[in-house]
Amino acid sequence: MSTLRGKTLFITGASRGIGRAIALRAARDGANVAIVAKSGVPNPKLPGTIHSVAEEVRAAGGQALAIQCDIREEEQVHAAVAATVKEFGGLDILVNNASAIWLAGVLDTPMKRYDLMTGVNSRGTFLCAQASLPELMKSANPHILTLAPPPSLEPKWWAGHTAYTLAKMGMSLVTLGLAGEFGRKGVAINALWPKTIVATDALNMIPGIELDRCRKPEIVADAAQAVLVRDAKSNTGKFFIDEDVLREAGVTDFDQYAVDPSKPLLPDLFLDP
């Protein structure tokens, strides 16, 4: 299988950035996409809503369902999954993209930020999987793909932003556990992480990052598509890196993904250069 045509995807955090890019890439294949996010109305600081992305998905050739949902809320997540199944007749793919970030040390991390990251990142990933798995296991080729890094206990990735690393690595550990439990049942459960920092609107709220030294979200979207068309039974429990996936798929031109091909790229967190 080399296309997502006819497949139904449930993508969290899909109102902008990487989630939006994955939705549009799936739409070009002719997929059905549930666009799941909190952003129901425009935000002057962060452009994009579930409704604007739904319009883009339809224009790109896919079917869309915009669902306003806070993935920290159990009832909302179960309702969103049920609405997706009712609209499209089933569920084939869950993409855990939603994530909160706060890059600060222990003394500069308010507990409300800690709770937000834990609730969205690790708990939200677990909850969305828990709600989706009964439907995914009815699919012929079910996948869960989580935007999370390879697990690491190296202190350098924890010092300076312990709360964020704990929440993000929580997503990675949930992936490990799910793969161990459901991989044997035919569900592909993997993670995907960018080799370099990806230019998203959320980065504008983090000082000091040079956006012209980043890649565009489309590189992660293309890598996600390449993973999600694989056979679920023989591809599970892996921590993929976007560039490696695309090289394996035959991509050789990576300048197309750079914001400015003339500038050196910034490596993402949790990966050595």
Image (tube, rainbow, N blue to C red):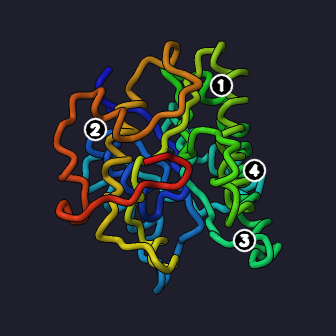
Would you call the spot at circle 1 few (<14 residues within 10 Å), some (14-19), or many (20 or more)? many
Spatial CA span between label 2 and label 3: 42 Å
Residue corresponding to mark 3: 105
Q: In the image, residue 227 lies at what x, y percent?
A: 41, 30
Spatial CA span between label 2 and label 4: 31 Å
Q: Nearer the viewer, residue 75 or 86?
A: 75
Query: Could you tell which of marks 2 and 4 lies nearer the N-terminus?
Result: 2
Spatial CA span between label 4 and label 1: 16 Å
Q: Which numbered dot is residue 123?
A: 4
Q: Amino acid at mark 2?
A: Asp
Spatial CA span between label 1 and label 2: 26 Å
State whether residue 115 is above or below residue 140: below
Query: Could you tell which of marks 2 and 3 lies nearer the N-terminus?
Result: 2
Q: Secondary structure at mark 3?
A: loop
Q: Secondary structure at mark 4?
A: helix
Q: Amino acid at mark 4?
A: Arg
Q: Amino acid at mark 3?
A: Gly
Q: Which numbered dot is residue 271?
A: none
1 vs 3, front mark: 3
Spatial CA span between label 4 and label 3: 22 Å
